Amino acid sequence: MASEAWQRKAGKNPSGGLNEKGRKSYEAANPGSDLKPPVKAGNNPRRSSFLARMGSMPGPEYKNGKPTRLLLSLQAWGASSKADAKKKAVQIQRKK
C-alpha cells in the first residue's frame, strides 16, 4: 500500500511545505485536522506562531549545498532564515 500524498513528493510543494493535494491527503488521514495554506505576509497570528516555532527547530538550513525542507518552508512563509523567522515573529507580536 502506498503512503499518503503528504508523505510523498506528490503532496509536497517544491518551494516548501505541502501543496493542496498534500493538505487534503493529511486531512483525510487525520480526521478533524484543518490545514491551511501559508500566510506569506502581514501580521497574521498564524504567521507569527509558525515563524517562531520553525525558527527554533533544530537542524541545518542547507544540506549538501541545497536548502532543506525547513528553509524552504520558512521562505514560503516570508522568512529568509531561522534567525530572520525569529525576528519577524517578534515584530509581528509587537504590532498586535
Image: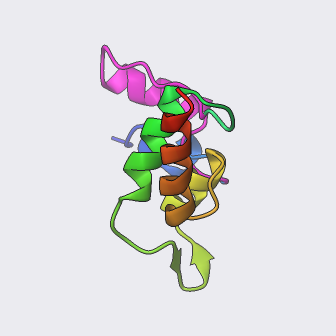
Nearest the eye: 29 or 79: 79
Q: Residue furthest front?
A: 94
Residue 9 is inside the magenta segment: no
Horizontal and vertical percent position of residue 7: 42, 46
Nearest the eye: 44 or 14: 44
Please give the name of the residue rendered at 50% of the width and 63% of the height, measured from the top-left corner: 82
Horizontal and vertical percent position of residue 50: 45, 41
Q: Quadrant of residue 91?
A: top right
Give the colour scheme of this rendering: rainbow
In the rendered image, is residue 51 in sight?
Answer: yes
Nearest the eye: 23 or 42: 42
> Is 41 placed above or below 53 here?
above
The N terminus is located in which quarter?
top left
Horizontal and vertical percent position of residue 18: 54, 40
Residue 21 is inside the magenta segment: yes
Nearest the eye: 72 or 55: 55
Please give the name of the residue rendered at 61% of the width and 77% of the height, measured from the top-left corner: 66
Q: Is residue 80 left or right of residue 63?
A: right
Please give the name of the residue rendered at 49% of the width and 59% of the height, measured from the top-left corner: 70
In the rendered image, is residue 5 in sight?
Answer: no
Q: Which residues are magenta?
A: 15-38
Q: Residue furthest top?
A: 32
Q: Is residue 41 left or right of residue 22?
A: right
> Is 39 placed above or below 87 here?
above
> Is 86 placed above or below 4 here?
below
